Amino acid sequence: MRIADRIADIPASPTLAISAKAAELKRAGVDVVSFSAGEPDFDTAASICEAATSAMKAGRTHYTPVGGAPELKEAICAHYKRKTGFDFTPAECVASCGAKHTLYNLFLSILNDGDEVIIPAPYWVSYPTQVRIAGGVPVEVSGAAENGFVPSVADLEAARTANTRAIVINNPTNPTGAFWDRSQLTEIAEWLKANPNIIVISDAIYDELIYDDLEYTELLNIAPELRDRYVIVNGVSKAFAMTGWRLGYALAPPAVVSAMQKIQSQSTSNPTSVTQFATIEALKQGEAVIAPMRREFTKRRDLIYKLLTDIPGVKLVKPRGAFYAFPDISSTYGKSANGHTIESDMDFATYLLDTVQVAVVPGGAFGAPGFIRMSYASSEASITEGVTRIARAIAALS
């Protein structure tokens, strides 16, 4: 059977591929320490699960409006009123089957063939592919590690062309844990004011997971005049440990929301009804659910940072948000052990999985060769064991 040509341009998700290989080894009885999965290891809070059960018992198991039940949209708007002070309306809100689905609908809604999207690198793996599927052109702009991986305005301006349609700002960032602070956002806001045709896509999925008493600022708060070309993408997967529930949402100008809902009406239709009512409870609980996880992630961040930076040759910018460490392992290039020669981050990831049974994700998947992504959404014991194995594997290279 002939497969559509577009499929050849869609790479398999490397994060899921590494996780699958690690899971296969585990099923075979191998003691694998995995740093590959991008999800909290906490269970969803009991109060949220109870809200879902109550919704089922009340018969809330039928179709809802495509973009979400009115109660859900109202809850999302109220949540963002508390977060930003802005009065969003239900006409500016659409809920989808996870933030990934939200982004997919968004790119399909705003991009014509040849439109360019500036994507700061390192970036989440799906941004470039989703842009290409929508007919757009991803334009990667790398941020230096010494600058916290955040690109300068000069870098963004150099990448801008007459075809630039949008920029994606993922703050805090997957895969680096980088955090765009207020001063950096202020500079970018001034650049955006000078370029009125650029849509701002704020992927804020990790905005509740920030450490060291840092305060999250939505760029829209710095430059309210951007509101008519500003899209906030968020969801409940990360901050509320609800990855499997699949609920993401966007706050955007009504015309964009209408377009996204039109596309969704011809694909998935509404997000799962029960999940919507669980999400309402999650947003109501807010900090009561998030704070304990944030405290635990802070301890894990500190632990993995210390352990990794104690390894000779490994360099790491201290993560300030999300739950990822992104160490530079390029010092291992050209070295060999146990039949493996390290010439790339993929070689290094394969070497770790084959020799010490540790799963990491190669940085090249995120537009950053020479690095690996390590999720510290796992126990302190697992982090310690895993990094100890990595140190042993690196020490064996010569």
Image: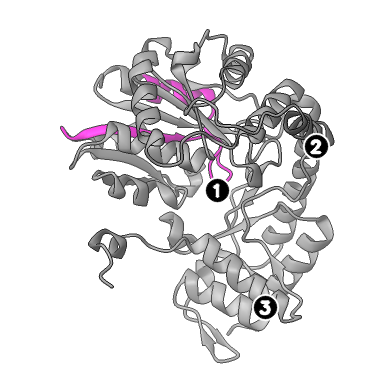
- Residue occupied by mark 2: 45
Tag 1: amino acid: Thr
In the displayed structure, 363 sits above or below 108; it is below
Q: How far apart are the two marked residues, 1 and 3, measured between alpha carbons?
A: 27 Å
Tag 3: amino acid: Leu
Q: How far apart are the two marked residues, 2 and 1, measured between alpha carbons?
A: 27 Å
Q: Residue at the spot x=53%, y=60% of the render?
A: 15
Q: How far apart are the two marked residues, 2 and 3, measured between alpha carbons?
A: 30 Å
Does the magenta portion include 178? yes
Instruction: Give 60 or 158, whichever is nearer the viewer.
Output: 60
Q: Which residues are magenta?
A: 161-189
Q: Earlier in the sequence, mark 1 or mark 3?
A: 3
250 relative to 172 in the view: left or right: left
Q: Which mark is residue 176?
A: 1
Instruction: Give 56 or 298, whichever is nearer the viewer.
Output: 56
Q: How is the image coloured?
A: one colour
Where on the picture, by quarter, is residue 357?
Answer: bottom right
Q: Which mark is residue 25?
A: 3
Does the magenta portion include 151? no
